[in-house]
């Protein structure tokens, strides 16, 4: 399967229009590492006995899995024989992470709005039941001002929440395009090189758990490179 030829038209050639993609990718990976480090820290809540639901647990686990991938790619970005494979894996992981993060954001936005709407209805109902009814025109003035203040606050919160969500989603999508564009350039230049670094050649000679884990990661990186070569060819 190949990506549409028009996909290259939306891929940025420079980060923010004037910064080299290499520097842009460094920034993207640094932001991703900070973000995932905060998420991975949340898994420590299990040790403290703090309850978390399934979605929070799933998000924290995804942070733990993707964090070493981003760290490895950033630390080997200057290494000629490693950055192609590692950026290929990052490209796939970051794209999946972007889609998963979007679904996660939409779900919790819906959950938050649903919860806030129910809380607002209950609070307004209890307020009306517990409020004494003033006589005459004073009653109408108090009721009108109370209704306006109650409706203005949720509307303001809704605007801020939706605006922040849209901005974060657009920035994340742009970061994803930067990663894809940089990886595509690497694959065009060095994607077919089969040279393996010296420290990686010993992976297939050593034994033990650590060596098996590193071999598995190496094979996943190679598979990711082959998948993207087919997509970008």
Image (tube, rainbow, N blue to C red):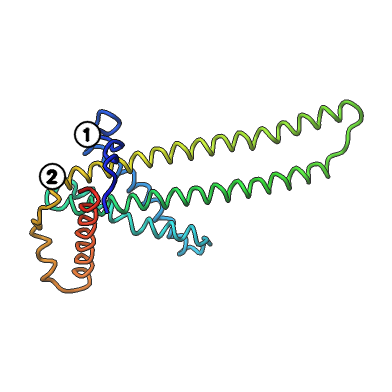
Q: Secondary structure at mark 2?
A: helix
92 or 58, which is in the foreground?
Answer: 92
Tally of marks: 2
- Residue 120 x/y as whole percent: 69, 44
In this rendering, which labeled residue sits more in front, label 2 or label 1?
A: 2
Q: Image height check: is 214 above or below 126? A: below
Give the labeled residue for mark 2. 189
Q: Residue furthest right?
A: 135
105 or 202, which is in the foreground?
Answer: 105
Give the labeled residue for mark 1. 20
Left or right placement of residue 182 versus residue 165 in this view: left
- Residue drawn at point x = 64 percent, y = 46 percent: 116
- Residue drawn at point x = 19 percent, y = 74 percent: 208
Quadrant housing residue 58:
bottom left
- Residue 212 x/y as whole percent: 21, 70
Dot placed on the residue nearer the N-terminal end, 2 or 1: 1
Q: Is residue 94 visible?
A: yes
Quadrant housing residue 140:
top right
- Residue 65 x/y as whole percent: 34, 59
Q: Are marks 2 and 1 in contact (CB under 8 Å)?
A: no
Q: Image height check: is 224 above or below 122? A: below
Give the quarter of the figure containing the N terminus. bottom left
């Amino acid at each position: 399967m190949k990506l549409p030829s028009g996909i290259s038209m939306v891929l940025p050639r420079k980060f923010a229009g004037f910064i080299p993609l290499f520097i842009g990718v460094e920034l993207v990976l640094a932001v991703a590492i900070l973000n995932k480090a905060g998420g991975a820290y949340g898994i420590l809540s299990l040790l403290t006995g703090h309850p978390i639901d399934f979605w929070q647990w799933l998000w924290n686990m995804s942070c733990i899995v993707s964090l070493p991938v981003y760290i490895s790619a950033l630390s080997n970005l200057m290494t000629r024989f490693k950055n192609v494979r590692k950026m290929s894996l990052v490209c796939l992981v970051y794209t999946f992470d972007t889609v998963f993060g979007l679904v996660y954001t939409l779900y919790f936005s819906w959950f938050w709005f649903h919860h806030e709407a129910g809380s607002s209805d209950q609070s307004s109902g209890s307020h009306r039941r517990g409020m004494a009814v003033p006589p005459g025109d004073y009653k109408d003035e108090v009721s009108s001002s109370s209704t306006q203040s109650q409706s203005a606050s949720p509307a303001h919160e809704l605007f801020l929440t939706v605006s922040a969500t849209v901005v974060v989603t657009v920035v994340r999508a742009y970061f994803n395009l930067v990663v894809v564009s940089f990886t595509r350039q690497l694959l065009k230049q060095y994607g077919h090189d089969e040279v393996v670094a010296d420290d990686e050649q010993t992976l297939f000679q050593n034994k033990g758990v650590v060596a098996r884990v590193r071999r598995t990661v190496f094979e996943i990186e190679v598979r990711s490179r082959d998948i993207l070569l087919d997509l970008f060819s």
